[in-house]
Amino acid sequence: MLDALRSAAQSVRNLVSRSLDNLESPRGGFDSTHPWFLTDRERDNPATTLAPWTSGNAVLPLPHGRTYFERLAHALDAVRTGDLVLFTDWRGDPEQLLTDDGLSIVDALVGAAHRGALVRGLLWRSHMDSMGFHGPENRELVEKINAAGGEVVLDQRVLAFGSHHQKFVVIRYCSPELDDVAFVGGIDLARSRRDDADHDGDPISRPFPAEYGDTPPWHDVQVELRGPAVVDVETIFRERWDDPAALSRLPWQAIPDIVRPRVPREPSVIPSFPDSPPRRGTCDVQLLRTYPRRKPAYPFAPQGERSVARAYAKALHRARSLIYIEDQYLWSLDVARVFAHALREHPTLHMMVVVPRYLDEEGVLTIPSALLGHAEALEELLSAGPDRVAVYNIENCSAVPVYVHAKVCVIDDVWATVGSDNFNRRSWTHDSELTAAIIDAECDARAPADPAGLGDGARVFARDLRLVLAREHLDRDEGDVADLFDPAEFFAAFQASAQKLEDWHKSGQRGPRPPGRLRPHSVDSSPRWQRVMAAPIYRNVVDPDGRPFKMRLTKRF
């Protein structure tokens, strides 16, 4: 009997090992043409016209909604007749302000249309507002822009329980004196997003769990792209825009469009912009996407696309020193296993994660299922590297938790990503997502010059992004970074800061509050009966799987 149990256990271990190999190596090995970026073969979507990657881009990180919205407002203010404004979003609130002088999102986009720009948008139709979603707000924004001469559609060309989660803006100017620009990341044109580094929150807030206060502090990141990558972002918009499938997945969803015809049911043709932007910087940019396998199929991704998942698998194959992550969820065991595999393969590899302390929902059904996924993911990571994995949440200087909505990853100060995808199965397989992977051609000479020891060196953009975010979380001045370059010292600095703040809280907040905003993150373990009850909702609704059936069986992305 004992031998039979050992044999069964070994069979399970072998199955898990094979599954992890598939996760790490989507198509039987990584192409050496580029050690970090996916090749066309590895993207595995021959239907797309998207370039593998572009070089010569200027990339500016934009932490916080206030920073991003000011840059976006300036770019929109410059558009004139014949210019092109394209945007996608998961949520759009017309009244959300972009600037201190009261310019709202709807004012900026309507103003662009009134000045003769071609304003085109794809806004997710959203689920019912009774489920806590935002269909009426999205419709209001669409109708107001369209009344001014723009053309924005409500797009529900998704799987059941799915969403269009991409968040980007593209602006193409006719004037050669203005640089075309694209903004890509995790920041919606929506309420609560316009916070800054102080994290006092956005006065235009949205309903949120009470733990986050009346104006929930919000941490988020976007990137500004100038150069050839702008055309790639435009291509992604045009592929979705030209999809011939009905905009509404269910026939009755089109009824409001028929009754109130300010929402187009068939998008018009967008004129071409022939000239590609010139080189503007030193960064290579690869755009990564998620699309599920859908019926009718996406013309640009008939079998879906999982380049987000595949790119992380390839980058983690090369990780040796430090994985730094900021994410809204991190609640998928499938995704955690990809990172855990890298941790087990490389004993010197450390992983640091910043997540929210509390969920952004208060649902009786969704909270237990989401906590189940989160707990499973953290358990997998901590078992792979007990002393090399650290998970934190953050708070502002008034001890109010900050909601982390950023989707950022930096590996070995070389490969960096900013996008809309979260580290869960939904984002890697089921919803539409867009993430920019960035490798700066400019090396950073500050020691350690090659953290991974593989000859890649450290790159300016990736290292600077990590340091900017770290200084904020540690409450440090711009020059106070000497102990943050080396991965081991960086890891220790976060640990020490978080422990001091945690000890201060446990002491009843006696004495001055120590600098820093980090606190150790933990998840309360649910009773077994609650886990059993929550599992079906978690697997099928909260974190569904959009892969073809054969891929699900083999655990491949």
Image: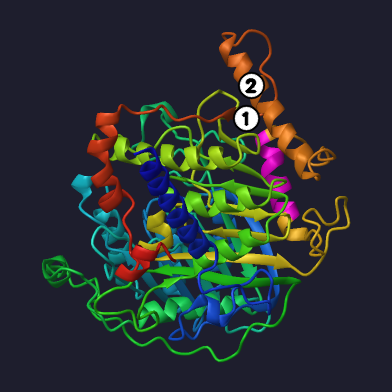
User: Which of the labelled discs sits on residue 501, or is there none?
Assistant: 2
Q: Residue 58: give x, y in percent of width and height.
A: 70, 69
Q: Residue at 51% of width from left, 76% of height from top?
A: 43
- Residue 406 appears in view: yes
- Name the residue that disc number 1 marks: 517
Mark 2: few/some/many CA within 10 Å (<14, 14-19, 20+): many
Q: Which of 507 and 61 is in front in this view?
A: 507
Residue 62 image point, x, y percent: 62, 54
Q: What element carries label 1?
A: loop
Which color scheme does this rendered protein use? rainbow
Residue at image point 49% right, 54% down:
187
Residue 464 among those drawn in magenta: yes
Which is more toward the observer, 517 or 160? 160
Quadrant position of the C terminus in the picture: bottom left
Q: Position of residue 54 (x, y in %)?
A: 65, 78
Residue kind at label 1, given as amino acid type: Arg
Residue 196 visible, this angle: no
Q: Are marks 1 and 2 in contact (CB under 8 Å)?
A: yes
Q: Decide: is 353 above or below 241.
A: above
Judge left or right: residue 312 versus residue 264.
right
Q: Residue 237 carries which label?
A: none
Q: What stretch is highlighted in magenta?
A: 463-473
Instruction: Name the quadrant containing residue 166.
Output: bottom left
The 10 Å Cα crowd at callout 1, few under 14, some 14 to 19, many 20 or more, is many
| Amino acid type at mark 2 | Leu
